[in-house]
Image (tube, grey):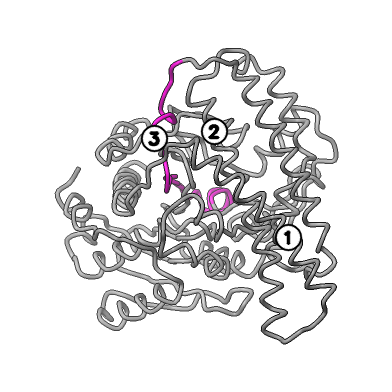
Amino acid sequence: MKKVFENLINNIPDYKEFLTVDEMDESSRKLAEKYPDTVELFEMGRTRDDHPLLCLKIGSGKHNALMFGCPHPNEPIGTMLLEHFTWQLAENEELRSELDYTWYIVKSWDADGTKLNENWFKGPYTIRNYARNFFRPAGFKQVDWTFPIDYKDLHFHNSIPETKAMMELIDKVQPKFIYSLHNAGFGGVYWYLTHETKEIYDEMYNAAAKQDIPLNLGEPEAPYCVTLAPAIYKELSIKDNYDYLEKYGAKNIGALISAGDCSAEYARERWGSFTMLTELPYFYDERIKDLSDSDMLRKDAALESLDYDAASNKVIKDIMNISLEYIPEESPFRLALKAFTRDDTKEATRNMIMTNPDFQKPATVAEKFDNLLIKKFYKMLSFGMLVRMNETELNSMNAAGESDEVKKAALSKAMDDALVEFNKLADYLEENINYQVVPIKKLVSIQLECGMIMADYLKKTF
């Protein structure tokens, strides 16, 4: 790696917490004020809650690059990368010159949703606290999955304001490189790429190895992922989702898929842009990298995971029904829970598991761990949102001095029942997962190094 990139990585502060949206905005304004000849700050749009979406333009290189944090609001690792990178870019002419890009940087794309996660941003960093304060919107309310698309009988054109603002920015700057700063919650390191870049895979793997963070070698996050190399996948698109459902017998697919496409596909189809994601975990367990055979078939592990998900969804729906008449239809928690407890695509996945020869072999320890424990971790997030949905309405009642005892009783009952289920699952996972909390500095180091490797590679070859 080039010396200027090594210095960039070595200078990453030992961050102990994540910044709030307001703290990010304040930092961006200070940066633009301090370096007016190098940095331009402009408002690219407004969120649904009318928060300004700020974009930094830094440098004047030959190529355009776009980076954005919090495409999902529970994923703030990239915001800390951008906090460090923006200041280094502004201060270091050698770095700007070596990269030779003009950088367009949005620290928190889903600012509204990010604010709903801020209660865990300052710690403590446990799986219980993370899940208890977690929020992630329904697909059709996600900034990076509401790009317009017409594909077979799928037609989506209900882009939200944040998505429209990003579409306009992409069309304006026509970026060569997009670094979409997602991250996972649990597991190991993995990547999504627009197309193969075999020449730099070893450098990408080494970026993770240097920080002693394992690759994610369990199940891919979607059954239609196309593997390019271990832990490296072709970028996801809603078309891939559609084709997968069609292949395994789903009907009326256009109605099953309520979201649109993503920024990577939009920019690739319009401007030939290359997008990279470096997915990183807040928590990991050594079993995620164990490729030895477990004591069960992969098919059986995957089917057990499906059955658990269906049973948990029923519990969530039953608790939701206790107080649903008192929850606003546009409650972000209600919309998310309705989306995340849908079971109408599971039959296609069950068909895939039963017919795909890859699932007839013994599961690796990583695959078993992923199916039987990590999937429960992600279901705990839904139980956390179920608690918060009712808690939020109770708090609103109290703030407004509302005295409807029937409504209060229903909300309290639903919240208490949700807390019982949440704590039961949290206790089980705390006992059965030997997780480690990954320091923020390590996560930023991996994500930033991979970004610099890719930016340098694309500049020369793409």
Secondary structure at badge 3 equals loop
* Residue 226 placement (x, y as % from top left): 55, 31
The amino acid pointed to by label 3 is: Thr
Q: Which residue is mark 2?
A: 220
Which mark sits nearer the N-terminus, 3 or 1? 3
* Residue 203 located left or right of residue 396: left
Q: Which mark is residue 335?
A: 1
What's the residue at 39%, 59% (across, down)?
A: 64
Q: Is residue 217 above or below residue 237?
A: above
Q: Position of residue 286 (x, y in %)?
A: 39, 31
Q: Quadrant of the C terminus?
A: top left
- The span picked out in magenta is 264-292
Give whichever of 393, 328 is nearer the camera: 393
Mark pair 3, 2: CA separation = 19 Å
Residues tagged 3 and 2 counted as in contact (Cβ below 8 A): no
Q: Earlier in the sequence, mark 3 or mark 2?
A: 3
Residue placed at 44% from the left, 31% from the top? 288
Q: Nearer the viewer, residue 321 or 97?
A: 321
Instruction: Identify the mark nearer the N-term, 1 or 2.
Output: 2
